[in-house]
Amino acid sequence: MLQETGLETITLSEAASKAISDIFTERKLEGYSLRVYLAGSGCCSGVSFGMALDNNIHDVDRTFESKGVRIVVDQVSMDYLQGARIDYVNDPQRGAGFVVDSPGARSQGDAHGEEACACGDSCDCNN
């Protein structure tokens, strides 16, 4: 069953909303959603997210709406995207693109407030 929530667990900035809406319009993608997903993770490097324009929504997907754009997330990615904010930036040096800021993807600190790896193994992540 498709799970839709009124809570904006994932939000878009005005710039991101406009950029996505413009893409939908330019490509004539009526009825499509923005799918955000966990694209990879690794010790010390954190997680990376991917995005796709999708009209194939699965029963187990979570959906959100932010600034008129429907956002779809699979169950595995949801843990990492809880409370995320997606922005669109146009940096003269790095170019234009989407940026995902997700508190669920940040590494957890230890009891002393030190940054810790998520892998559970002993390593020096400050290299």
Image (spheres, rainbow, N blue to C red):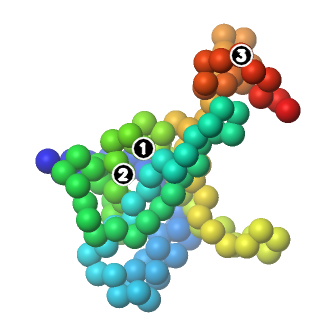
Q: Is residue 72 above or below residue 122?
A: below
Q: Residues within 10 Å of mark 3 (few under 14, many from 20)?
A: few
- For the residue marked with disc 2, what is the amino acid? Val
1 and 2 marks in contact (CB < 8 Å): yes
How many angstroms separate mark 1 from mark 2 (CA)? 6 Å
Residue occupying image coordinates x 55% and y 46%: 40
How many angstroms separate mark 3 from mark 2 (CA)? 32 Å
How many angstroms separate mark 3 from mark 1 (CA)? 26 Å
Query: Which residue bears the numbered disc 1?
Result: 77
Coordinates of residue 25 in the picture (x, y in percent): 40, 86
Query: Which residue bears the numbered disc 2?
Result: 73
3 and 2 marks in contact (CB < 8 Å): no
- For the residue marked with disc 1, what is the amino acid? Ser
Q: Residues within 10 Å of mark 2 (few under 14, many from 20)?
A: many
- Residue 122's mark? 3
Coordinates of residue 72 in the picture (x, y in percent): 34, 56
Coordinates of residue 57 in the picture (x, y in percent): 25, 60
Residue occupying image coordinates x 63% and y 69%: 97
Q: Is residue 110 left or right of residue 91?
A: left
Displayed quadrant of residue 110: top right
- For the residue marked with disc 3, what is the amino acid? Ser
Look at discs 3 and 2 and give the one toward the viewer.
3
Classify mark 3: helix, strand or loop. loop
Coordinates of residue 107 in the picture (x, y in percent): 63, 30
